[in-house]
Amino acid sequence: MASRSYDIKDPSLAADGRRRIEWAAREMPVLKQIHQRFSEERPLEGIRIVACAHITTETANLALALKAGGADAVLCASNPLSTQDDVAAALVDEGIPVFAIKGEDNETYYKHINAALDHKPQVIVDDGADVVSAVHTTRKELLPHILGATEETTTGVVRDRAMEQKGVLQFPVVAVNDADTKHFFDNRYGTGQSSIDGILRATNILLSGKTVVVAGYGWCGKGIAMRLRGMGARVIVTEIDSVKALEAAMDGFAVMTMARAAAQGDLFVTATGNINVVDKDAFAQMKDGAILANAGHFNSEINISALEEMSGEGRRTLRPMVEEFRIAEDQRVIVLGEGRLINLAAAEGHPASVMDMSFANQALAAAFIVKEAGKLEKRVYQVPQEIDHEIARMKLVSMGIDIDVLTDEQAHYLSSWEAGT
């Protein structure tokens, strides 16, 4: 596989993918401006980039912007179920190699990552830190080439920071996820809408009147809980963080342990980034027909292995992305999308308009790494505030929104300490 220039499902799908990429671009005005700027300034000229991401129409527009900036980019999937095969074909047709096929098994998934890494990247654009992890474990020979990486997800930033704390991180990483123009909007509004979109496409259930348990009240969990309540569901939140639990309670949600919530939920949505958040004890307490979906990055939040053990041969597929596990004669548990990211397994991921800001951060963070090459320490960095604010400004302009600016007097007042009451 490493000797091939790409590995996708069907190159003949390129025309369909190109039309859908063009459609998404209409909702990505900030990235369009960056694309234009990059094509003039060429800040990534000759830089080899490996981008591990969900191969979607939005990611395609990021890849095209990187190419416009002079980058020599190769893409691989960050999730076995998230690839849009027509998009992968369109990118290959544009001269951007892609190693991704929707539904690939785990072995192929990691072969694709290694095939992309054969490109010997200087910059890594990561989603979940799988590529960063790979170059620190199985592909250490690549470390001398790497100027730095960017990270899209909460899960990936947690992994990168763990590496930093243990003193093993060998290059700088920019935590794109932590930019205000990313997590305030992508994680909350994007995940909130797209996760529900995936659940409804998979099941066509009515949310109104259902009791839904949301595990985790970070930015993703907040968005999911907000949207579920807006659709008439009764929402229960489970948390391990006392401050977030208090915030959920103050926001009007019922807050309790998973042990208590398990018997009440009609639908469970995990968004914690942790492992076995819904486990064997919870399964045993669930109503017949309880539905489980995951909105966290990895398929580790729902303990599928425990469900397999509890159900034995009593497992069947009811419809695409919907599996039933019979754990007792009168008790069935339903899992959506194999426990993987439901918004990408069963739907199309976040709306393009919110990914516009996230991928604007990715593009500018990649350029920042190249510009500052050799000056950055081997640690996790925040996105520079000037980049974050510039993206917000461009987004407001694209929305036709004007905001106030400080007068000289106000600016002086805010920077002084002498004035009081």
Image (cartoon, rainbow, N blue to C red):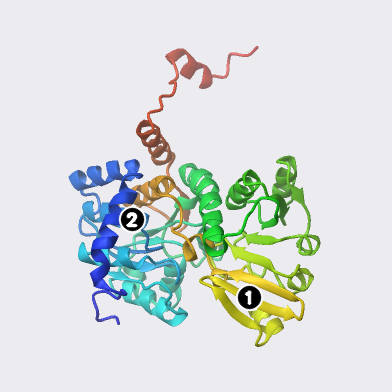
Q: Position of residue 388 (x, y in %)?
A: 42, 40
Spatial CA distance of label 2 from label 1 is 53 Å
Q: Is residue 164 visible?
A: no
As rendered, which of 199 and 151 lies closer to the eye?
A: 199
Q: Position of residue 330 (x, y in %)?
A: 77, 77
As rendered, which of 85 and 132 lies closer to the eye?
A: 85
**What kind of element bears circle 1?**
strand
Disc assigned to residue 194: none
State the residue at coordinates (74%, 40%): 250
Badge 2: few (under 14), some or many (20 or more) residues near its Cα, within 10 Å?
few
Q: Amino acid at mark 2?
A: Gly
- Quarter of the image with the N terminus in it: bottom left
Q: Is residue 47 left or right of residue 411?
A: left
Q: Is residue 327 left or right of residue 128?
A: right
Name the residue tied to disc 2.
374
Q: Is residue 169 above or below residue 184?
A: below
Q: Is residue 302 left or right of residue 171?
A: right
As rendered, which of 208 and 45 lies closer to the eye?
A: 208
Q: Residue furthest left?
A: 40
Q: Quadrant of residue 275?
A: bottom right
Disc assigned to residue 324: 1
Q: Quadrant of residue 340?
A: bottom right
Q: Amino acid at mark 1?
A: Glu
**What kind of element bears circle 2?**
loop
Q: Position of residue 15 (x, y in %)?
A: 23, 62
Badge 1: few (under 14), some or many (20 or more) residues near its Cα, within 10 Å?
many
As rendered, which of 208 and 56 lies closer to the eye?
A: 208
